[in-house]
C-alpha cells in the first residue's frame, strides 16, 4: 500500500530536532546535557504514578523467581540505556518482570535482551553480544534503547492509561537526541504509540500500517520510523522473527542514516502486514 504523508509540521510544534535542525541542548556543555539526563533518570526511577504497576513491580522484586533468589531486584522504573548522542532510538514496550525489573537496565537479563543485543553486536552497535547486568561493561554506539512503559506490568500488558503516564519520559528523551534520524519500534504497540507521540506534538502524520521491515518518513526534519516484530520469545521461538529478519532491521536503519530525505516518502517492505504484533517486554 502506498500513501502520501504531509511533510511539514506547524512552526510552533515542539518536536525532536534531527541532524538538519539544531537543538537548544546542542549548545549546552556536555556536562550540562549529562546532568539533564541524570535528572530525568532520577525522575523516572522515583515515579509512582501508576499504583497497579508499583504494586506489581515491588511484589515481583520481593518474591523473586527461584533462579534469581540470590539477586537483589531493581524493582523500580527503568530509564533508557545507551548513547546519549544516538542517531537511532529503539522503542520497546515495558520491562520484563524478571529481566529489566531485576537488573535495572533495558532489555537486560532475559531472552528478549539476548536476541536484541546479539543483533546489535553483529551490526556493530554494541560492544558485546550479551547483557547480564548494569555493571557488565556493555556500551552502545549510536543507539539509545527506551520503552513506552518503564515499570514491569502484570502479564506483560500495561494499560493504555499507564503507557500515557509514561510517554512524557519518552518524549523528553526524543527531544534530547539532537541527531535522531531513525526510530525502531519493536512491536505494533510501540509503533502505534510512537506515531501518537508525534501526532500529539502537532506532526501531520497519516495512518500508517505496521509490518515487519516497513519504514516510513514521518515528515520533513523528522526521523524515519521502522517497524519490527518484538524479539519476544513467542516471536523468536516460533520462527516468526529470525536472526536474519532482525539483522535486516539494523542494516536498514544504518542505510537510512546516510540516505537523503525524500519528502513525504513512504517505503513499505516486501513483508505483508499480518496480525497485530503486541510483542513482549524488554
Image (cartoon, rainbow, N blue to C red):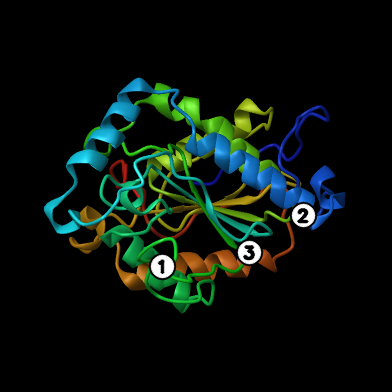
Mark 2 to mark 3: distance in Å? 30 Å
Please tell me which residue lies in front, 280 or 37: 37
Residue 19 can be seen, yes or no: no
Q: Which residue is mark 1?
A: 117
User: Do the CB atoms of the residues marked 2 and 1 lie less than 8 Å apart?
Assistant: no
**Of callouts 2 and 3, the N-terminal one:** 2
Q: Nearer the viewer, mark 1 or mark 3?
A: 1
| Residue displayed at 62% across by 65% down | 142
Where's residue 251, x and y in %?
Answer: 52, 71
User: Do the CB atoms of the residues marked 1 and 3 lie less than 8 Å apart?
Assistant: no
Residue 185 can be seen, yes or no: yes
Q: Which residue is mark 3?
A: 256
Q: Could you say which disc has been placed on residue 31 in the image?
A: 2
Label 1 CA crowd tier, 10 Å (few <14, some 14–19, many 20+) = many
Q: Is residue 200 left or right of 56 when viewed as pictured?
A: right
Where's residue 80, x and y in %?
Answer: 52, 49
**Of callouts 2 and 1, the N-terminal one:** 2
Where's residue 67, x and y in %?
Answer: 15, 58
Amino acid at each position: 500500500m502506498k500513501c502520501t504523508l504531509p511533510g511539514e509540521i506547524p512552526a510552533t510544534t515542539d518536536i525532536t530536532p534531527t541532524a538538519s535542525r539544531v537543538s537548544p541542548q546542542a549548545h549546552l556543555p556536555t556536562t550540562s546535557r549529562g546532568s539533564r539526563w541524570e535528572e530525568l533518570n532520577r525522575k523516572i526511577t522515583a515515579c509512582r504514578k501508576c499504583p497497579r504497576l508499583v504494586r506489581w513491580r515491588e511484589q515481583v522484586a520481593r518474591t523473586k523467581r527461584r533462579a534469581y533468589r540470590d539477586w537483589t531486584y531493581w524493582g523500580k522504573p527503568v530509564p533508557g540505556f545507551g548513547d546519549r548522542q544516538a542517531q537511532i532510538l529503539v522503542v520497546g514496550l515495558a520491562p520484563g518482570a524478571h529481566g529489566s525489573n531485576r537488573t535495572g537496565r533495558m532489555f537486560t537479563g532475559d531472552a528478549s535482551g539476548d536476541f536484541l543485543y546479539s543483533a546489535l553486536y553483529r551490526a556493530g552497535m554494541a560492544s558485546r553480544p550479551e547483557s547480564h547486568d548494569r555493571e557488565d561493561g556493555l556500551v552502545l554506539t549510536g543507539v539509545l534503547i527506551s520503552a513506552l512503559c518503564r515499570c514491569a506490568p502484570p502479564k506483560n500488558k500495561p494499560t493504555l492509561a499507564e503507557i500515557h503516564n509514561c510517554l512524557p519520559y519518552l518524549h523528553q528523551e526524543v527531544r534530547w537526541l539532537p541527531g535522531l534520524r531513525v526510530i525502531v519500534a519493536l512491536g505494533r504497540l510501540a509503533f502505534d504509540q510512537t506515531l501518537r507521540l508525534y501526532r500529539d506534538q502537532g506532526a501531520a502524520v497519516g495512518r500508517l500500517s505496521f509490518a515487519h521491515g516497513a519504514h516510513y518518513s514521518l515528515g520533513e526534519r523528522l526521523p524515519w520510523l521502522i517497524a519490527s516484530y518484538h524479539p519476544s520469545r513467542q516471536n523468536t521461538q516460533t520462527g516468526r522473527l529470525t536472526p536474519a529478519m532482525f539483522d535486516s532491521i539494523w542494516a536498514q536503519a544504518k542505510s537510512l542514516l546516510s540516505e537523503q530525505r525524500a519528502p513525504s516518502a513512504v517505503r513499505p517492505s516486501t513483508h505483508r502486514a499480518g496480525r497485530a504484533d503486541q510483542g513482549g517486554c524488554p
